[in-house]
Image (cartoon, rainbow, N blue to C red):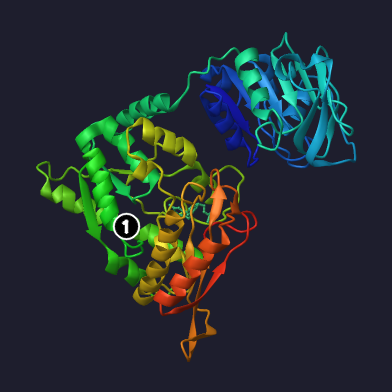
């Protein structure tokens, strides 16, 4: 593999993903990894990620400099670039100037293997305080900016390169090309990693993990759990049973769609559990978002436990418990639940931070390092139909985190009706591919005065939250045409009696998140 060393930046996984986009398998490792551990992994290359703004900052993450003596091609980015400079005998200085955001870089000395053949002037994305003042002995300076004399350097002999900017972000010109040049030209790695390889690798890992054990998979109807189940099915066939929990927080028609689409296309055994009373009972009186999420996470697990007991009781090999639970957890779920190294808990995704502590299952999570579009590619490779792989995301906690206030049966009925109208109109307008997802949120504790017919109304607002995104880590609000918004608003206020106002959320992420809770 290529090792991506994580110095605690949000960007590390993005780098790992860009490496995979270049057709090269990558693994994220912590910055505390030792030279011996690196040597054991026999990596074909190492990429050092960004991190804090300076190697001199108090508590700046450490790195075992002996790793630079292993003869492995290495590429340093931002903080990783400075770590490299300092370790190899260059000089990192306090410049007093910060460079932040879009910056003009000038390619020097032909650009070497990483920048060679590219335009001399490039717009790159920077985020740093201190800067490399002098390149290490034997290294050529390959770019500079008005503030940073050494913005890129490299040594063909040592097969080590680095840039001060962030080639992994889309705002950087030629960023992906720079990474590819390092991987293919410098490290000489063939681009042969693809969805097929991920499947093969995960199938092998799952077989190893579960052996002849039986496995259940929580299927939500979304892409992630569908693809996770399909990989596990590929690996262990009939040892897998899928469980679809109707927790009463589903959208209109969702249960029927899951039952039809999924079973028809995979032939997997599917058990549907009606757990509506259990979930709504547990959520009664609860308004705090994190508490809701934790209750929902816990009740999912309790439902799976009960189902597994019933499945064991009915099977010939009674007494052989089902120890494994498949979840379609993706990398962004892990990060936002505070699971990356040094990342904050933004919200507890039901399948990560929302899990109960006394979990009796061993988790099988074949998608844990991947992003949604990678998962979709794998789903297509596995032959899942477009109705499943192209489906917009819908969170496991469902409408439970889209009712601001207590979740009740009546409020669910209201939200379900409004949501169905919004989805129908967006689909009719041909906007599904452009929109990542469009939560419809019921502000159940807010009321406003309206007028309908000749009478006064005192109803609730719903919020439309259409967003565009690549991976749900960041998002922008989608500019849905006014006439489509008008149709949605008219229909909802006419057809859903409890709702007398429709409002549009025009906040990007950050600072907003996609869901309201
Ligand atoms: P946020 O609200 O964090 O959402 O910007 C990012 C993406 O994750 C989905 N989401 C969840 N999915 N369980 C899930 O399966 C959860 O607990 C959960 N919370 C948010 C959300 O719909 C969006 O696609």
Residue at x-position 73% and y-position 10% = 156
- Image quadrant where residue 167 sits: top right
Q: Is residue 199 above or below residue 154?
A: below
Residue 288 drawn at (x, y percent): 50, 69
Query: Does residue 99 appear to the left or right of 330 in the view shown?
Result: right
Q: Is residue 287 visible?
A: no
Of the pair 20 and 465, the residue shown nearer to us: 465
* Ligand 1 under 8 Å from disc 1 Cβ: no
Crowdedness of circle 1 by 10 Å Cα count: few (<14), some, many (20+)? some
Residue 506 drawn at (x, y percent): 62, 61
Residue at x-position 44% and y-position 63% = 422
Residue sitting farthest toward the bottom: 455
Of the pair 141 and 319, the residue shown nearer to us: 141
Of the pair 352 and 57, the residue shown nearer to us: 352
Residue sitting farthest toward the top: 157
Q: Is residue 28 above or below residue 52?
A: above
Residue sitting farthest toward the left: 316
Residue sitting farthest toward the front: 483
Residue at x-position 52% and y-position 23% = 23
Residue 87 drawn at (x, y percent): 76, 23
Number of labelled discs? 1
Q: Is residue 126 above or below residue 465?
A: above
Residue 147 drawn at (x, y percent): 89, 34
Residue at x-position 21% and y-position 45% = 321
Q: Secondary structure at mark 1?
A: helix
Instruction: Report the residue marked by disc 1.
Output: 254
Q: Is residue 169 visible?
A: yes
């Amino acid at each position: 593999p290529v090792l991506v060393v994580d110095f605690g930046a949000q960007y590390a996984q993005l780098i790992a993903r860009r490496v995979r986009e270049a057709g090269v398998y990558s693994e994220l490792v912590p910055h505390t990894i030792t030279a011996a551990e690196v040597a054991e992994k026999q990596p074909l290359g190492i990429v050092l990620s960004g991190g804090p703004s300076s190697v001199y900052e108090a508590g700046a993450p450490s790195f075992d400099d002996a790793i630079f003596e292993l003869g492995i091609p290495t590429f340093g980015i931002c903080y990783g670039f400075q770590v490299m400079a300092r370790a190899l005998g260059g000089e990192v200085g306090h410049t007093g100037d910060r460079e932040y955001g879009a910056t003009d870089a000038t390619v020097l000395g032909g650009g070497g293997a990483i920048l060679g053949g590219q335009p001399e002037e490039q717009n790159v994305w920077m985020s740093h305080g201190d800067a490399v003042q002098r390149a290490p002995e034997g290294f050529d300076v390959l770019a500079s900016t008005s503030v940073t004399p050494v913005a890129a350097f490299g040594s063909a002999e040592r097969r080590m390169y680095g840039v001060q900017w962030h080639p992994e972000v889309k705002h950087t010109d030629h960023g992906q090309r720079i990474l590819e040049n390092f991987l293919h030209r410098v490290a000489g790695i063939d681009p042969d990693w693809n969805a097929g390889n991920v499947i093969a690798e995960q199938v092998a890992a799952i077989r190893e993990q579960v052996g002849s054990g039986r496995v259940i998979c929580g299927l939500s109807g979304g892409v992630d759990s569908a693809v996770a189940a399909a990989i596990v099915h590929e690996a262990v066939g009939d040892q897998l049973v899928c469980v679809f929990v109707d927790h009463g927080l589903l959208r209109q028609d969702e249960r029927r769609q899951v039952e039809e689409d999924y079973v028809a296309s995979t032939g997997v055994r599917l058990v549907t559990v009606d757990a509506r009373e259990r979930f709504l009972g547990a959520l009664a009186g609860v308004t705090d978002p994190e508490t809701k999420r934790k209750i929902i996470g816990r009740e999912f697990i309790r439902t799976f436990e009960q189902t597994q007991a019933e499945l064991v009781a009915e099977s010939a090999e009674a007494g052989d418990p089902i120890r494994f639970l498949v979840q379609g957890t993706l990398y962004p779920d892990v990060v936002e639940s505070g699971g990356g190294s040094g990342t904050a808990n933004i919200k507890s995704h039901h399948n990560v931070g929302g899990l109960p502590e006394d979990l009796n299952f061993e988790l099988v999570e074949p998608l844990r390092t991947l992003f949604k579009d990678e998962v979709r590619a794998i789903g297509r490779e596995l032959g899942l139909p477009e109705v499943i792989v192209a489906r917009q995301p819908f969170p496991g906690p469902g409408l439970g985190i889209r009712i601001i206030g207590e979740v009740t049966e009546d409020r669910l009925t209201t939200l379900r009706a409004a949501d169905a109208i919004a989805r129908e109109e967006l689909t009719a307008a041909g906007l599904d591919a452009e929109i990542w997802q469009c939560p419809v949120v019921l502000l159940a504790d807010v009321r406003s005065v309206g007028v309908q017919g000749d009478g006064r109304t005192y109803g609730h607002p719903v919020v439309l939250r259409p967003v565009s995104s690549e991976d749900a880590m960041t998002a922008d609000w989608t500019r849905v045409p006014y006439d489509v918004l008008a149709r949605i608003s008219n229909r909802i206020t006419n057809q859903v009696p409890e709702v007398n106002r429709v409002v549009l959320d025009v906040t990007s992420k950050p600072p907003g998140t996609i869901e309201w809770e």
